[in-house]
Image (tube, grey):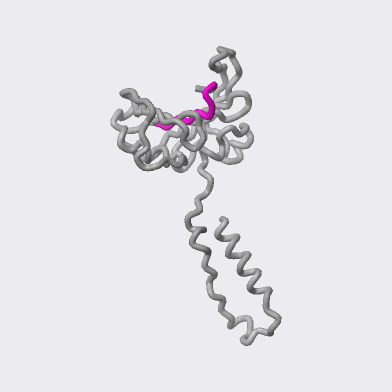
């Protein structure tokens, strides 16, 4: 989108900068395509997960559409053990379903259920990238268990957990869970 706007802006500036009459009739003019700068090709849109973290339910709905599932209940905040209302919505997306837990009115726990098959544990980084997280090659988990790998500090999130598909095929990754702050773990 930025590249298109950039090209249109350049075209508008270039077409409005000349005081001379056109040498050929307008129907016969040809305009050379404007190349975007090399940096523009490297730009990527904001990943969906990062774009919805800590957003309101209404903002997440604008970004991801109508939920396909909704449930309400209570959540226990840590370390206070205080009970608070929560809402969990699931949104269907092209890359996979996204489950969002809203606590205190904001998206604080996000689960990505990829449609693509990722092998556990070998494809953990690929699965996190599919969720929209920027993970360096060779990133090592902070801790692990037989059915999950925990990563911390990725894209400013408190924790990222890659979990085996225990209900389907345990050789694959079932989902990636993102927790924004320690009190929502």
Q: Could you say where residue 159 lies in the image, as x and y percent from the top left?
A: 46, 29
Q: Which stretch appears magenta?
A: 175-183
Q: Could you say where residue 22 lies in the image, as x and y percent from the top left?
A: 65, 84
Q: Nearer the viewer, residue 84 or 144?
A: 144
Quarter the N terminus occupies:
bottom right
Let me know if residue 62 is in the magenta part.
Answer: no
The image quadrant that residue 96 belongs to is top left
Q: Could you say where residue 76 lies in the image, as x and y percent from the top left?
A: 55, 15
- Residue 55 shown left or right of residue 174 in the figure: right
Q: From the viewer's perspective, is residue 103 above or below residue 119?
A: above
* Residue at the right extreme of this rendering: 19
Q: Residue at x 28, y 31 (%)?
A: 171
Q: From the viewer's perspective, is residue 102 above or below residue 6?
A: above
Q: Could you say where residue 129 lies in the image, as x and y percent from the top left?
A: 42, 41
* Residue at the left extreme of this rendering: 171
- Residue 73 shown left or right of residue 127 in the figure: right
Let me know if residue 179 is in the magenta part.
Answer: yes
Q: Residue at x 37, y 41 (%)?
A: 126
Q: Residue at x 52, y 28 (%)?
A: 109
Q: From the viewer's perspective, is residue 17 above or below residue 4?
A: below
- Residue 95 shown left or right of residue 100 in the figure: left
* Residue at the top extreme of this rendering: 81
Q: Nearer the viewer, residue 167 or 125?
A: 125
Figure label count = 0
């Amino acid at each position: 989108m930025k590249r298109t706007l950039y090209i249109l802006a350049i075209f508008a500036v270039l077409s409005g900068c000349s005081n001379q009459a056109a040498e050929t009739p307008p129907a016969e003019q040809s305009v050379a395509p404007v190349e975007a700068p090399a940096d523009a090709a490297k730009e990527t849109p904001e990943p969906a997960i990062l774009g919805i973290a800590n957003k309101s339910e209404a903002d997440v709905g604008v970004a991801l559409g109508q939920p396909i599932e909704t449930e309400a209940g209570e959540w226990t905040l840590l370390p206070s053990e205080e009970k608070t209302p929560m809402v969990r919505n699931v949104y269907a997306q092209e890359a996979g379903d996204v489950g969002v837990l809203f606590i205190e009115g904001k998206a604080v726990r996000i689960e990505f259920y990829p449609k693509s098959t990722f092998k556990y544990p070998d494809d953990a980084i690929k699965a996190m990238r599919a969720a929209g997280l920027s993970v360096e090659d060779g990133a090592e988990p902070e801790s692990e268990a037989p059915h999950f790998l925990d990563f911390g500090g990725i894209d400013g999130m408190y924790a990222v957990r890659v979990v085996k598909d225990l209900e389907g095929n345990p050789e694959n990754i079932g989902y990636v869970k993102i927790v924004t702050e320690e009190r929502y773990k």
